[in-house]
Image: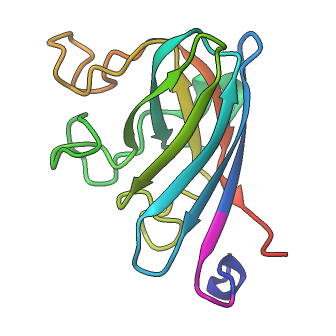
């Protein structure tokens, strides 16, 4: 992917991920990064059970075995799992999203550790929604420092460049 092909005339990079999963999880997410700014993730996911769901960028854009083949959390700096505001966190640790009683989660997250260009770009990786809340690395469970003990992967999508037209 050539640098010029990834950005608009203003230097803004845009990407999209279409979320699919079990049993009726569906959604669309847009990723927008302005020059030297955070990446803003917006969108809506439907078909979730009401409550909190772990929300992460995973290392691989591979959905050949559903969401299970997306690999571990995106963690280029080899840190422990944590909350989005923590210094010690995976780059892909985006915390939790909340689904209302209607099963719909409206997402609006800004984060500096998920760029759409450069050596730690999330393009071609996957975004994953989990069945359970992410304990943000503080739950004391054996999986807290690796996955936030967020449970099964109920929805995912590959992050790809979005047309600037």
Please provide percent x and percent y for residue 51. Answer: 48, 13
Given residues 108 and 83, the one toward you in this image is 108
Given residues 101 and 113, the one toward you in this image is 101
- Reply yes or no: does residue 10 show up in magenta: yes
Q: Residue at x 62, y 88 (%)?
A: 10
Q: Which quadrant would residue 61 be assigned to in this image?
A: top right
Please provide percent x and percent y for residue 161. Answer: 71, 63
Q: Residue at x 27, y 16 (%)?
A: 143
Which quadrant is home to the N terminus? bottom right
In the drawing, does residue 161 fall left or right of residue 121?
A: right
Which quadrant is home to the C terminus? bottom right
Q: Residue at x 77, y 14 (%)?
A: 24
Q: From what the image shows, is residue 58 above or below residue 151?
A: below
- Reply yes or no: does residue 88 show up in magenta: no
Q: From what the image shows, is residue 39 above or below residue 59?
A: below
Magenta-colored span: 9-14
Q: Which residue is at the far front?
A: 101
Given residues 25 and 109, the one toward you in this image is 109
In the drawing, does residue 136 fall left or right of residue 72?
A: left
Q: Which quadrant would residue 84 be assigned to in this image?
A: top left
């Amino acid at each position: 992917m050539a640098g010029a092909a990834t950005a608009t005339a203003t230097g803004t990079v845009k990407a999209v991920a279409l979320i699919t999963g079990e049993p009726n999880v569906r959604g669309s997410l847009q990723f927008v990064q302005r020059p030297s700014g955070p990446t803003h993730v917006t969108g809506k996911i439907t078909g979730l059970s009401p409550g909190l769901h772990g929300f992460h960028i995973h290392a691989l854009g591979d959905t050949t075995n559903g969401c299970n083949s997306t690999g571990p959390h995106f963690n280029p700096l080899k840190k422990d799992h944590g909350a989005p505001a923590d210094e010690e966190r995976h780059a892909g640790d985006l915390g939790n999203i909340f689904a209302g009683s209607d099963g719909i989660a409206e997402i609006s997250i800004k984060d500096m550790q998920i760029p759409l260009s450069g050596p730690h770009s999330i393009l071609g990786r996957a975004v994953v929604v989990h069945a359970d809340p992410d304990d943000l690395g503080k739950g004391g469970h054996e999986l807290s420092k690796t996955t936030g003990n967020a449970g099964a992967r109920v929805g995912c999508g590959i992050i790809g460049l979005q047309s600037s037209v």
